[in-house]
Structure formats: structure tokens, C-alpha cells
Image: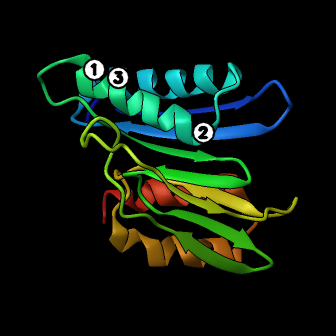
Amino acid sequence: QETISGDTAILFTDSAGNPYLVLSDGMGTGKNAAIESRMTTELFRKFISGGICGTAAIRMMNGLLLTKSPQETFATLDAGEMTMMKSGAAATLIRHGGKVSRISATTFPLGLEPEGEASVRHVMLYPDDIILMLSDGVSEETYPLIRQLLESSSDLEQIVMEICDKAEIF
């Protein structure tokens, strides 16, 4: 409903050439949420590019968000390489060999709890796999539809368009 999205997604490679796909959802709406998600993704990119491992980067970012201000400022983080790190993020769906699996975590968003831990899961990916990272703007009730789309099509653009078209229904 907002003209400014509170979600930010980035794709980058570290100094060793490992690709990272990162999605963050800033809490709230509009400009403030957009600032939180951009700051979270950019900090993560800078820490990783500087040689800091993913879990250490998450702990450092959590500490920074906790000390940022007395106002509620926190953001989810979903970062994928061969290791999925989730901090309060919505489920990630992966299609491999025609089967769809769902990766979820029960962790809190960064900047909400002092521990700031991420759920870490190692995932083997192959060239034809599809990874679909979602923010909480897509509700849990949409997942059966998304699973069906992933099982029946390899056209990622069409899958995304269908999800966006149906998002308001759910």
C-alpha cells in the first residue's frame, strides 16, 4: 500500500567470488522501513566484502541496531549462498529436481534481542534450482500457491508476476 517499499534485495560477490543474495525487510512502512532495510543489506555486504564471516557479521549488525536509537528499529535478514542465514525472515522456498522445500527459522529480526543469532542451514544448490526469498509482505496463506507455481513452471519472471498479482488476495 506504500509508495516506498520497506524491502531491499541485493546480489553481490565477496572477494573470493562467492555470490550472496540478501533480502531485508525494514520494520514499519514507507521511508523509515526503507532506510532500515537498505542499511541492513549494505552493512551485511560491507562486512562480508571486508572478510567477516556471515554469523559474525550478523552479530555485529545486531549490536549496531540495538544501540542505534531508543525507537523501535529492527530488520529481518535473509542471506543466501551455499549457507542460508535467517534472522526473523519469512520462509525461503527452493525448487530442486522438481521438488520444493521450505526453509524456515524461529529467530528474531536483527536489532530486537541482545543475542542477535541467525539460524544457519547448509543447502546444496544446482544450476537449475530456483531460490525464492520472500518478505513478510507475502503471507503464509500464499505458500501453497507459490509451491504449485514452482512445481509447474521454470519461468521465474512468470512465477514472480503471478505471486505479485495474487498477493493482494491473500
Q: Amino acid at mark 1?
A: Lys
Q: CA distance from mark 3 to mark 1?
A: 20 Å
Quarter of the rendering containing residue 127: bottom right
Quarter of the rendering containing residue 92: bottom right
Asked if one can make out residue 24 in the rendered structure from this viewpoint, the answer is yes
Asked if one can make out residue 5 in the rendered structure from this viewpoint, the answer is no
Q: Quadrant of the C terminus?
A: bottom left
Would you name the residue on which mark 1 appears? 31
| Circle nearer the viewer, 3 or 1 | 3
Q: Judge from the rendering whether residue 80 lies leftward or rightward of residue 18; answer left or right.
A: left
| x and y percentages locating residue 110 in the rendered image | 35, 39
| Foreground residue among 162 and 46 | 46
Q: CA distance from mark 1 to mark 2?
A: 27 Å
Q: Which mark is residue 54?
A: 2
Crowding at mark 2 (Cα within 10 Å: few <14, some 14-19, many 20+): many
Q: Which mark is residue 64?
A: 3
Q: Residue at x 48, y 52 (%)?
A: 86
Which label's residue is closer to the chain start, 3 or 1?
1
Q: Residue at x 74, y 54 (%)?
A: 82
Q: Is label 3 in a helix, a strand or a loop?
A: helix
Q: Amino acid at mark 2?
A: Gly
Q: Tell me which colouring the rendered structure shows.
A: rainbow
Q: Judge from the rendering whether residue 12 lies leftward or rightward of residue 64; answer left or right.
A: right
